[in-house]
Image (cartoon, grey):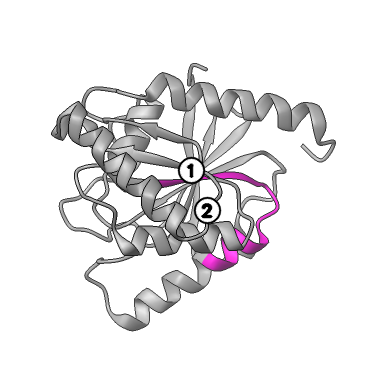
């Protein structure tokens, strides 16, 4: 898939105010400072579509971007170590949960994980929530240019081991990416394209 157009549509903290268009949505979420904005900008060929910041937790709303006029890329607030108040963080969690559990247009979420670090409990717990809630998702390992191929393989193996220990039957589909080197861009966009084709073919609502 080639992204020809990508435009910002709306930001809000109320799922009821999300776009009414019945188009497939792909949500991107991850721990704060995982490189989410950089990845989104790399995928869409826009340097400033998603705002990047050295300060974790800058994304604090549900952000909808219309891609090629036929699907939405949704940028969600990060979870974890954002330097915001506990009250603000609980509000984040509330509307993130609302989004995942009520948004009918969502067809797949991409959970972003920094490949430089060994398996983090917070990521495993979040993915367990996704699995228990039967929300379809893939894992996107980010910042692959920062470590060696050997370490990448080792860290992915550690995630597999932890997930199996948490009663997962198999590892969800995953992608290894680098926003700096555009690694994984083609694979990720091809996956979205394939899912879109199935969605439009099999679901009369779309």
- Tell whether label 2 touches label 1 (CB within 8 Å): yes
Residue 20 spot, x, y in % from top left: 69, 50
Q: Secondary structure at mark 1?
A: loop
Residue 2 spot, x, y in % from top left: 49, 16
In the picture shown, does residue 131 fall above or below 107? Answer: below
Residue 85 spot, x, y in % from top left: 28, 79
* Mark identifier at residue 136: none
In the picture shown, does residue 160 fall above or below 147? Answer: below
Q: Quadrant of residue 26?
A: top right
Q: Quadrant of residue 151?
A: top left
What range is drawn magenta here?
97-111
Residue at point 38%, 55% (across, down): 162
In the picture shown, does residue 15 fall above or below 118? Answer: below
Q: Which residue is mark 1?
A: 171
Residue at point 72%, 43% (across, down): 22
| 10 Å crowding of disc 2: few (<14), some (14-19), many (20+) | some
Q: Which residue is mark 2?
A: 168
Image quadrant for the C terminus?
Answer: top right
For residue 203: magenta?
no
Residue at point 32%, 29% (across, down): 42
Q: Secondary structure at mark 2?
A: loop
Front-most of residues 15 and 194? 194
């Amino acid at each position: 898939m080639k992204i020809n157009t990508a435009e910002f549509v709306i930001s809000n903290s109320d799922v009821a105010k999300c776009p009414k268009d019945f188009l497939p949505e792909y949500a991107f979420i991850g721990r704060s400072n995982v490189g989410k904005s950089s990845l989104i900008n790399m995928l869409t060929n826009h340097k400033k579509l998603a705002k990047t910041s050295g300060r974790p937790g800058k994304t604090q709303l549900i952000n909808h971007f219309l891609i090629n006029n036929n699907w939405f890329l949704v940028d969600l607030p990060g979870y974890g170590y954002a330097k915001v108040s506990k009250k603000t963080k609980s509000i984040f969690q509330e509307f993130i949960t609302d989004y995942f559990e009520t948004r009918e247009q969502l067809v797949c979420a991409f959970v972003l994980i920094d490949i430089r670090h060994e398996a983090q409990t917070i990521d495993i717990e979040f993915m367990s929530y996704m699995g228990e809630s039967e929300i379809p998702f893939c894992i996107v390992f980010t910042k692959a240019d920062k470590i060696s191929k050997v370490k990448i393989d080792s860290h992915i193996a550690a995630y597999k081991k932890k997930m199996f220990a948490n009663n997962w039957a198999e590892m969800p589909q995953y992608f290894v990416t680098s926003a700096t080197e555009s690694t994984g861009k083609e694979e990720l966009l091809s996956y979205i394209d394939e899912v879109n084709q199935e969605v439009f073919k099999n679901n009369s609502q779309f």
